[in-house]
């Protein structure tokens, strides 16, 4: 009984994590299904059709590639713009800081349907043709804030003495940035880019408002939901999930290995280089 | 979403902020983008919400100052408005209940599993939002295990879950749960565990420690988490469309169909504007307590 009480919290925590993954398990399992009728919602028979013939249904892979392309372009742009803002916020003094903060904060707290609708109102009034360009514009817009917040957190966690040390050792501002600041912030920027890509790749609501006739992967799924989602969609989504999870887990693993290596080095050379350790 | 994981500033250092033109140069492109494609659209949205229809041509509108669009839209769609706030409110409360134990565990008990558990919290969002929502159709199906179980206990008013409001709320709770867990964790992680030990040493019961120390200190996370869950849940229409019946439509569904299918731009814009205004009021009441700098 005491054992149960002591582990109750851990048990609850694991239960919640399991709960988070139940629908994903359903998606993955149904990718091996051979659905009876058009709706792939209940298990009938094992089949590898979804995986061996992954582009077999017209439109699935096209929409998938469109989403990848939109994701890459908007992530690149938003990462550059957002990182610049993060540097300005942490490293520079400027006027209008609170309104700047507000303009970064608001897109994260505005319902997607409002952002989608208002951007569509802008494009309609300007008679700007809807398509891939308008989707990319929208994606950059709502991704910037998330990049700013992620990179800013990393920058604030960084010890400014490292840069000062570089400057003391006669590194010019450019060299200090190139060889000290950038490598230290890089994991934050990479994380922000990964987050940005996953937001863009998975966005449905804002894209749907501003897509015109372009069909992204989520828009394809939305359309297919009415007439039955092909197993290929489940296979592709499972694939994306596994790849993304592997990327994140690998980067975590490499990060902790590097940290451990540094810790070993410190214990052997007990000089004050603890500042080199990135705060996790 | 990683967004809300806190910045732990290096100890004992003061970040020196330079004052130069470079700061403005760094801000300019990104902030211009946000101004043009986030801020200005609200102006066009407002203008659109006041437009009047062109007689005889459906889907065409001319600039006007037809304030009556607002009461008209609200009179027609207030049930969906109310339903959005109620569903989102229930989902947020449930998410808080579900998220707190996990966030607490990750912050205080997870030890070397902490990083992995945080990855696992974020990981579900790598799988398609739409497909995950669609998967609940399978889980909550009429002949499924969960529905059968609750029916056995006679707990379901309609003898089913799918295509009822319960399914919509369940979907909303599930989908926005990580937005609750992460800020909660960020706040709990900042709490010095010695405070909890001290309370324990002074013979406070576990419940008293929670009520007097943990909970008040985690309030910033509760505030941020409830905002980040409630707001997207209010505007969401995917859960309602995929898991609910036509009786469970939310304001997002109305805005979407009016904008894209009926091409009734003024009504849809007016509704978006009211939704945004309602949410802004909420956000600012909250921000008074939490402060923007903490939330960004």
Image: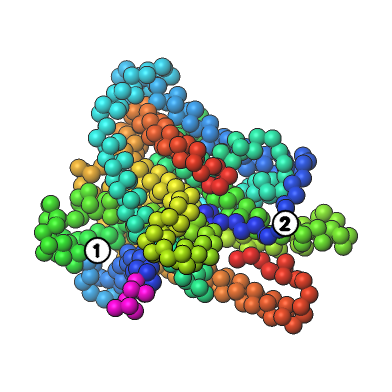
Residue bounds of the magenta highlight:
A1-8
Examine the residues drawn in magenta and state their main secondary structure.
Answer: helix
Q: Residue sitting at 47 percent across and 36 percent down?
A: B284
Residue A225 placed where, x, y %? 29, 54
Quadrant of the image containing the N terminus of chain A: bottom left
Q: Is residue B1 above or below residue A125?
A: below
Is A141 inside the magenta-drawn segment? Answer: no
Q: Crowdedness of circle 2 by 10 Å Cα count: few (<14), some, many (20+)?
A: few
Q: Residue furthest right?
A: A170
Q: What residue is disc 1 on?
A: B139
* Earlier-in-chain disc, 2 versus 1: 2
Towards the viewer: B221 or A173: B221
Q: Chain of mark 1?
A: B
Q: Is residue B254 left or right of residue A83?
A: left
**Residue A54's quadrant in the figure?**
bottom left
Towards the viewer: B9 or A141: B9
Q: Is residue B115 above or below residue A227?
A: below
Quadrant of the image containing the C terminus of chain A: bottom right
Towards the viewer: A210 or B276: B276
The numbered dot on residue B13 is: 2
**Circle 1 sits in a helix, a strand or a loop, which is it?**
helix
Residue B150 placed where, x, y %? 16, 61
Q: Residue furthest bottom?
A: A268
Q: How many marks?
A: 2
Q: Is residue A217 visible?
A: no
In this view, the mark in front (2 or 1): 2
Q: Crowdedness of circle 1 by 10 Å Cα count: few (<14), some, many (20+)?
A: many
Q: Is residue A168 above or below residue A132?
A: below
Q: Residue furthest front?
A: B202
Residue B22 placed where, x, y %? 76, 43
Q: Residue sitting at 55 percent across and 73 percent down?
A: A250
């Amino acid at each position: 009984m005491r054992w149960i009480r002591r582990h109750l919290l851990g048990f609850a925590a694991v239960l919640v994590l399991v709960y988070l993954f139940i629908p994903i398990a359903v998606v993955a399992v149904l990718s091996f299904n051979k659905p009876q009728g058009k709706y792939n919602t209940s298990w009938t028979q094992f089949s590898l059709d979804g995986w061996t013939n992954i582009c077999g249904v017209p439109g699935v892979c096209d929409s998938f590639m469109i989403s990848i392309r939109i994701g890459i372009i908007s992530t690149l742009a938003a990462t550059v713009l957002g990182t610049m803002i993060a540097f300005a916020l942490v490293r520079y003094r400027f006027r209008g800081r609170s309104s700047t903060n507000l303009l970064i904060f608001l897109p994260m707290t505005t319902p997607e349907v409002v952002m989608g609708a208002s951007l569509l109102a802008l494009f309609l009034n300007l008679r700007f043709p809807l398509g891939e360009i308008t989707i990319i514009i929208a994606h950059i817009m709502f991704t910037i804030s998330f990049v700013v917040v992620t990179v800013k957190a990393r920058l604030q966690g960084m010890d400014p003495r490292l840069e000062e040390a570089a400057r003391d050792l006669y590194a010019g501002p450019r060299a200090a940035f190139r060889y000290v600041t950038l490598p230290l912030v890089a994991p934050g920027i990479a994380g922000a880019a990964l987050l940005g890509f996953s937001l863009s790749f998975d966005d449905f609501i804002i894209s749907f408002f501003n897509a015109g006739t372009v069909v992204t992967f989520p828009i394809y799924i939305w359309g297919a939901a009415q007439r039955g989602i092909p197993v290929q969609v489940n296979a592709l989504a499972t694939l994306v999930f596994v790849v993304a999870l592997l990327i994140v887990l690998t980067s975590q693993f490499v990060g902790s290995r590097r940290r451990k290596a540094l810790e070993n080095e410190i214990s052997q050379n007990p000089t004050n280089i603890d500042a080199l350790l990135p705060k996790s | 979403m990683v967004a809300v994981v806190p910045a732990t500033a290096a100890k004992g250092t003061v970040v020196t902020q330079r004052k130069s033109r470079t700061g403005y140069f760094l801000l300019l492109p990104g902030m211009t983008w946000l101004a043009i494609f986030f801020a200005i659209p609200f102006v066009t949205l407002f203008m659109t919400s006041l437009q009047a229809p062109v007689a005889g041509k459906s889907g065409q509108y001319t600039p006007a100052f037809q304030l009556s669009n607002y009461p008209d839209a609200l009179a027609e769609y207030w049930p969906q408005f109310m339903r959005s706030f109620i569903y989102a409110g229930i989902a947020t409360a449930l998410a808080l209940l579900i998220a707190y134990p996990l966030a607490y565990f990750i912050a205080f008990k997870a030890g070397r599993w902490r990083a992995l558990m945080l990855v696992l919290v974020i990981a579900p969002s790598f799988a398609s939002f739409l497909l995950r929502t669609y998967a609940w159709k399978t889980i909550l199906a009429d002949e499924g295990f969960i529905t059968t179980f609750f029916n056995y206990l006679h707990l379901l008013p309609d003898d089913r879950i799918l295509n009822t409001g319960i399914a919509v709320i369940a979907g909303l709770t599930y989908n926005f749960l990580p937005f609750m867990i992460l800020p909660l964790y960020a706040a709990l992680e900042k709490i010095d565990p010695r405070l909890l030990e001290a309370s324990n040493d002074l013979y406070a019961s576990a419940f008293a420690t929670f009520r007097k120390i943990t909970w008040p200190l985690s309030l910033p996370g509760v505030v941020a988490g409830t905002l980040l869950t409630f707001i997207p849940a209010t505007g969401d229409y995917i859960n309602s469309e995929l898991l609910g019946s036509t009786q469970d439509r939310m304001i997002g569904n109305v805005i979407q169909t009016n904008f894209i299918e009926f091409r009734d731009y003024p009504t849809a814009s007016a509704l978006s504007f009211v939704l945004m205004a309602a949410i802004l009021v909420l956000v600012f009441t909250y921000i008074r307590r939490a402060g923007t700098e903490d939330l960004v």
